[in-house]
Image (tube, grey):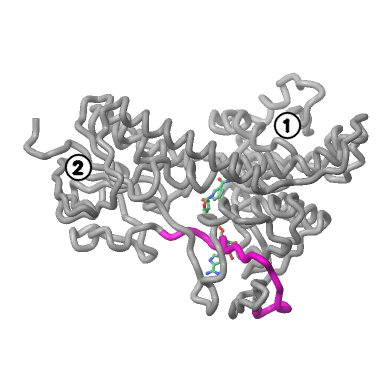
Amino acid sequence: MSNFDFDLFIIGAGSGGVRAARIAGAYGARVAVAEEHRVGGTCVIRGCVPKKLLVYGSHFAEDLDDAAMFGWDVPEKRFDWAVLRDNVLGEVSRLEGLYGETLGNHDVQVFKDRAVITGPNQIRLGSGRTMTAGKILVAVGARPALPDVPGVEHAITSNEVFHLERMPRRVVIAGGGYIANEFAGIFHQFGAHVTLVNRSDTILRGYDEQIVDRLVKISIAKGIDMRFNSAFSAIDKQEDGSLICRMNGCDDIIADEVLFAIGRTPNTEGLGLQEAGVKLSDNGAIIVDDEYRSSVPTIFAVGDVTDRIQLTPVAIREGQAFADTQFGGKKIRVDYGCVPSSVFSHPPIAAVGLTEGQAKNRLGTVRTYTSDFRPMKNVLAGRNERSLYKLVVDDGSDEVVGVHLIGPDAPEIMQAAAIAVKARLKKADFDATVALHPTMAEELVLMR
Ligand code: NDP
């Protein structure tokens, strides 16, 4: 037993920190976690979980409209934001409790306090209490970035969006990434007029262009207003509480809420990292090696604070690998290849592997297969919304190197498709698989 108070002190009880704490605790390490907000972190408290519940809630708008063609007489629909908001926040609190229980079950000591690093093996809590640990893991995540624009204090971010007092009538969303497209769909389905503003001429950079193009077309057809090559010069609050977005590149826009979703910044300020000798990248992320070790040998970091791939399952894998390697005697490395991802837009996008453009650059000759179809549920409902599935195949090896989908349930379908791409299956294997009929997913094995 070392002379330190703990074997491991973790700052941040989000996805990466909680996994590392639980696994290190299971290996017998004496573990403590400090969390200044709520146990669960971004994903559980103000990210993936409440967002997905809002996606479910918002989808009823279309489902209730479509129900008539399936024989249902639905009385005039009415949406009560306060009911959904409070139910979602209740679920978040329930999950927060479960996360706390998990830590307790693994004898992890939780300090509900801010912690800063005061030396390679030393931490000071907000209360003033100082503690020591053999290893320190920084898993403090990231926070929404905000531009330096006059009046930006009138805008909200994904931190505040789950707590809105009322559903706004007009929403302006800045950004063209995950959060912007997900909340464009959510607000639109709840009946708000949505304007999405992006600085460049595209959205969702990194996703396959054909799939993104389909989302843009569907979003515009639904009534979402999209402005490209535009930037905010100021946000003015009027006496009636509405906001005027002064724009460069497009006309000014009036809104009841303005949501900034322009990326996330690692939460490294004021943590004592640089004073302790921890090297940071230009955007403030902690630079780590493939064991998550920073430039200070006793200080490690996992998850969004390292700004590798800002996704919950990646942070969880990193936390697991860190604990296995440092406390379980196993040298585990995370494989960052073939990480599937989804945008929970309306309809959702899902992808794994290389886009057509990336594959051409890396592999030379590629074959692509597409299926452009109207899901049978949409046909009967009279909803003119088409799905698009795309396979990218390495012409030399016949391996399927990318799968890209837009359409209902695309993320659910993608998890299984990602196994095939990860296993480097060939197009011939897809072709040899019998279709499961009638499904949308069968298109994956029917493309010729
Ligand atoms: P993203 O990185 O997805 O997108 C950022 C968007 O903002 C881009 O369109 C970008 O434009 C634009 N942008 C960047 N900087 C500026 C700026 N200074 N001024 C104006 N526009 C700017 O960020 P999000 O905030 O949507 O999400 C943050 C991260 O959270 C994501 O990267 C993702 O990893 C994670 N996330 C994942 C989800 C999921 O898995 N479904 C859901 C939500 C979040 P350009 O393309 O020109 O750079």
Instruction: From this view, report whether residue 67 is shown above or below residue 155.
Output: above
Q: Looking at the magenta stretch, what is its main secondary structure?
A: strand
Give the position of the N terminus as an image quadrant. top left
SS of the residue under disc 2: strand
Foreground: 359 or 172?
172
Which quadrant would residue 3 be assigned to in this image?
A: top left
The part of the chain drawn in magenta is: 246-265
Numbered label attached to residue 444:
1
Image position, residue 49 (x, y; %): 55, 40
Residue 273 is situated, as x and y percent measured from the top left of the image, at: 24, 58
What SS does tag 1 mark?
Answer: helix
Q: Amino acid at mark 1?
A: Leu
Cα gap from disc 2 to disc 1, whole angstroms? 47 Å
Residue that label 2 marks: 135
Question: Relative to the observer, which residue lies in front, 175 or 171?
Answer: 171
Give the foreground label among 2 and 1.
2
Residue sitting at x 21%, y 54%:
117
Q: How many marks?
A: 2
Image side of residue 145 versus residue 138, left or right: right
Q: Is residue 321 something one can see in this rendering?
A: yes
Nearest the viewer among 20 and 94 is: 94
Which is nearer the N-term, disc 2 or disc 1? Answer: 2
Q: Residue drawn 53% across and 56% down? A: 160
* Residue shown at 90% from the left, 31% from the top: 72
Could you tell me residue 343's position as x and y percent? 63, 47
Residue found at x 21% / y 38%:
8
Figure quadrant, ligand 1: bottom right
Under 8 Å from ligand 1: the CB of mark 1? no
Q: Residue furthest left?
A: 3
